[in-house]
Amino acid sequence: MRVCFDSLGGGANPNEDWVGASPNLAVVLDGLSTAGLSTGCRHGVPWYVAHLGGHLMAALADPNMTLPDGLATALERVAALHPECDLADPGTPSATVAVLRQRYAVFDYLVLADSPVVFEGTEGGHTVITDLRVDDVLPELRAEVESYETHTPGHREALQRLVLAQRQVRNTPDGYWVAGTNPEAAQHCLTGSAKLRDVRSAAVMSDGVSRLVSEYKMATWDEIFATLRTAGPRGLIETVRKTEATDPTGRRWPRYKSGDDATVAYCQW
């Protein structure tokens, strides 16, 4: 498997995405926004995703390790790195997870939350694996955030109210699941396999890229993969940025940030 990847922050703040790859593995993490609220952890989201990504790559280097077990192992190892922090705080650093691993003539995938894995079929068409359970919770608060233009006091306050409420249902049976400190989250991933002969290429990405299709409706998956073939991951991310620049305050496409961190790993063979 040949993997090329890129990641670009969405603004002045540090990039909270993380990407890593090897000849048989691609991992993308998207750190959850804190909206300026306390987390109980002195390290921060970029530290968390960097350490989780490294430990996840290490765990999954063992071909006999299943993807959920590898994620559970990585979560345990990262939690052990900072026991002095309040890991029971509902705002403790967390992330979405998307993994693709080649195993002989099969691709195994794992998705936790809304960073998707997308397969391009050898005979056309695309299969999108994503976990959108977060969209089913707190719709009224989500709508309130989207009623404001970005970079306004009303937007910032509404976003903080939403994040506080999300923290109460995060990693609970009545809410949605992300990678945090509890290894149980690994048992709530979407997992499966695809046969090598059925797949032309694949992309593992954060929702800062996939929204070009899913939310902005400004590209099809055919166009996404055509851009990846001709311009690579950076070209695709630049397409996202150019699109967002036409709507800097979120009037056409209401969103949490004018530009989100954007990451994609493009996998070919």
Image (tube, rainbow, N blue to C red):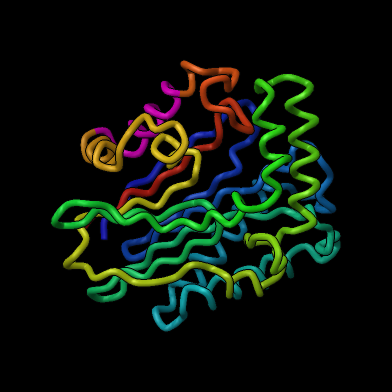
Identity of the residue furthest to the left in this view: 123
Q: Is residue 71 above or below residue 41?
A: below
- Main secondary-structure element of the magenta-colored stretch: helix
Residue 190, how many percent across, how many down? 48, 67
How many labels sit on residues?
0
Residue 5, how many percent across, how many down? 38, 45
Q: Is residue 103 above or below residue 94?
A: below
Give the image quarter of residue 82: bottom right
Give the image quarter of residue 99: bottom left
Judged left or right of residue 255, residue 236 is left
Instruction: Please give the name of the residue rendered at 75% of the width and 42% of the height, measured from the top-left corner.
Output: 162
Residue 259, how many percent across, how many down? 55, 28
Instruction: Please give the name of the residue rendered at 67% of the width and 44% of the height, measured from the top-left corner.
Output: 139
Quadrant of the drawing holding the N terminus: bottom left
Residue 54, how many percent across, how many down? 55, 61
Instruction: Please give the name of the residue rendered at 53% of the width and 49% of the height, measured from the top-left corner.
Output: 18
Judged left or right of residue 174, residue 237 is left
Q: Which residues are magenta?
A: 231-243
Q: Is residue 13 above or below residue 99?
A: above
Judged left or right of residue 25, residue 120 is left
Q: Is residue 259 above or below residue 112?
A: above
Which of the pair 94/121 is nearer the observer?
121
Instruction: Please give the name of the residue rendered at 53% of the width and 58% of the height, measured from the top-left corner.
Output: 97
Which of the pair 186/152 is nearer the observer?
152
Residue 27 forms part of the magenta stretch: no
Residue 235 forms part of the magenta stretch: yes
Judged left or right of residue 157, residue 262 is left
